[in-house]
Image (cartoon, rainbow, N blue to C red):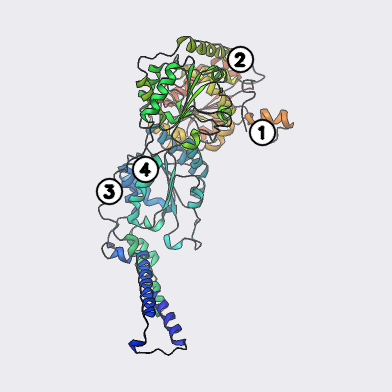
Amino acid sequence: MVLLARSRTENVQVSLPLKISMDPAAVSPSSCCCTGWLLVLLGTALLGTAHRLGLIYQLWHKAEPKSTRHGGELVAEALKAHGVRYLFTLVGGHISPILVASEKLGIRVVDTRHEATAVFAADAVARLSGTVGVAAVTAGPGVTNTVTAVKNAQMAESPVLLIGGAAATLQKGRGALQDIDQLCLFKPLCKFCASVRTVRDIVPTLRRAIAAAQSGTPGPVFVEFPIDVLYPYHLVEKELRPKGTPRGLLSKVINWYLGNHLRNLYAGAWETRDFSPLPVQVPHATAEQVQQCVELVSRAKKPVMLLGSQVTLPPTPVEKLREALEALGIPCFLGGMARGMLGRDSTLHIRQNRRDALKEADLVILAGTVCDFRLSYGRVLSRRSTIIAVNRDHTQLLRNADIFWKPHVAIQGDAGSFLLKLSQGLKGYSSPQDWTRSLKDGDHRKEKANWEKSEEPTEQHVNPLKLLHHVDNLLPENSLLVSDGGDFVGSAAYIMRPRGPLRWLDPGAFGTLGVGGGFALGAKLCRPDSEVWILYGDGSLGYSIMEFDTFVRHKMPVIALVGNDACWSQISREQVPLLGSNVACGLAYVDYHLVAEGLGGKGFLLSRQDEVRMDSVIQAAQEACRRGHPTLINALIGRTSFREGSISV
């Protein structure tokens, strides 16, 4: 390249119609200055080119052509150093070195039937383990298949690392197999995006990515690995080098360039480096902010707390948080991952009549709870209430503020640690018992009404509320519930009672269907002794029923309960009365239990004929699961008015 540029310069100089004087006295100071600047610019350009080509780095760091090591080993070592125990994937040649190296280091590689499932499983691991969840997928369509799952992780604030294969560094933009601009897809979705260009960059890039995923407001990150940074030197050289001896100047220049690119790709690759995790930055409430809130709470007569998923994030252990909440004694509404925080039958956990309670409360603490559609954008909050909002994310902290609501104290910080400090500052405080008792009495009345509604016969099949009550009564204390659906799962959220903290998984604010298979997979790995249930609608089941093959192959016994009403009921309920048509809402009463059996699991049918022995069918499914069989209960359910008026858009 430099030779060609110099040749062009010489041609231009020869053609200039100027007579150059050799008399030193004829050379002016200004011309000397210009010449000096030109030399500086030329030197800078040459140094820049040498830097970009890696020539300067290669003066001190050499490649090792005879080494059989590969970049996949560095990826695996970095993951291991960060406490990663599981790697979810759908295999592809672009990422094979990562999978093989990870398995050799003891990281369990779990392959799924869809890339989205791999990311959902990583999401579940991140939520339940307190560390980063990891998925690796192949280039192009393998990466694009994960977009919805990555967006779900972003909105659910889950620290997920997505590793994507990519075309070789020199083939980018040249029409290589499955080569697209992958970074542009993920920059709006991820906190950190990078493409690794050399083997020596693998470890520092992964360290930065994992720290970014867990810092501040957690979220997904994406790291792209071109195929040539993952395979051994000799294999890449075989693909890169020309077959014959180069002839001619241009061929020799190209051959030198390719050889230099290869040497730079591996220069310093196997030198000793730091694999340890970088510090994770978590925002915290200040002592002054906590004290201000202590004073406000101590004066409140009717306080209430709304806890969202953020309260379950590290560094606060959920059991310590539960103790703090019980010490405060303030009635709590639990949402998202916070469901189950207070156990099954806590006197502080209020499950019903939230809108009425918020209208009456004189102080409301929004701990990781956002004023989006789930709180009617803040309209359910009374302007007479003192509102304390705590959230790691500034945008979420003030979502719709000054439109429908306004916080008296807004704290950008970790909600879990804030509640611990609040509890410590309020030692000896006791929330008014008559207020808590009145809310709990309302709870009991509403739940009694729900029970009575569950006993009402439906036109056909089983009453879904009755089914859910029976399942809830038979759940063991170690059970973990995964929700994936609309109407049936919406009913379950009111009926089912998670037995403890981190025993409920739902998609979060994005409302994504299809999370069930992946969430259950991650949950069973993190909680191998738990009885993991997936609560499916028959519509949502279609997204991940093939993962029963994954459950069978990887010996993951879970139980799927399918509310089969042959309809997208949550949509149909509004579409039919508003628009007069059920188009695209109807499904069929498919024998999903036979599909599960065809994939190697156990299947049970529960219809109206089985209603009198409903408990026996549920217990038989539980027993099959305990024996190691992934199990599906295909429950044919009728329709009730329980969910009328629920949100679908």
> As shown in the figure, which amino acid type bears the numbered disc 2?
Lys
Q: Are marks 2 and 3 in contact (CB under 8 Å)?
A: no
Q: Which residue is mark 4?
A: 211
1 or 3: mark nearer the eye: 3
Mark 1 to mark 2 CA distance (whole Å): 25 Å
The amino acid type, in three-letter code, at marker 1 is Cys
Q: CA distance from mark 2 to mark 4?
A: 49 Å
Residue 232 left/right relative to 392: left
Q: Amino acid at mark 4?
A: Ala
Q: Amino acid at mark 3?
A: Asp
- For residue 134, which quarter of the picture? top left
Tell me the quadrant of the picture where the N terminus can be found. Answer: bottom left
Q: Which mark is residue 274?
A: 3
At a point 40% along the width and 41% down the height, the residue shown is: 213
Foreground pick, 466 / 450: 450
State the residue position of label 2. 453
Residue 249 drawn at (x, y percent): 40, 79
Q: Secondary structure at mark 2?
A: helix
Distance between the alpha carbons at the discs numbered 1 and 3: 55 Å
Q: Residue at x 52, y 21 (%)?
A: 385
Q: Residue 585 — which label?
A: 1
Residue 279 percent coordinates (x, y): 32, 41
Choose the circle earlier in sequence order: 4 or 3.
4
Above or below, 433 relative to 504? above
Residue 2 picture location, percent across and down = 39, 75
Within-10-Å neighbours for mark 4: few <14, some 14–19, many 20+? many
Q: Is residue 516 visible?
A: no
Camera-side mark, 1 or 4: 4
Asked if residue 338 shows in the view, the reply is yes
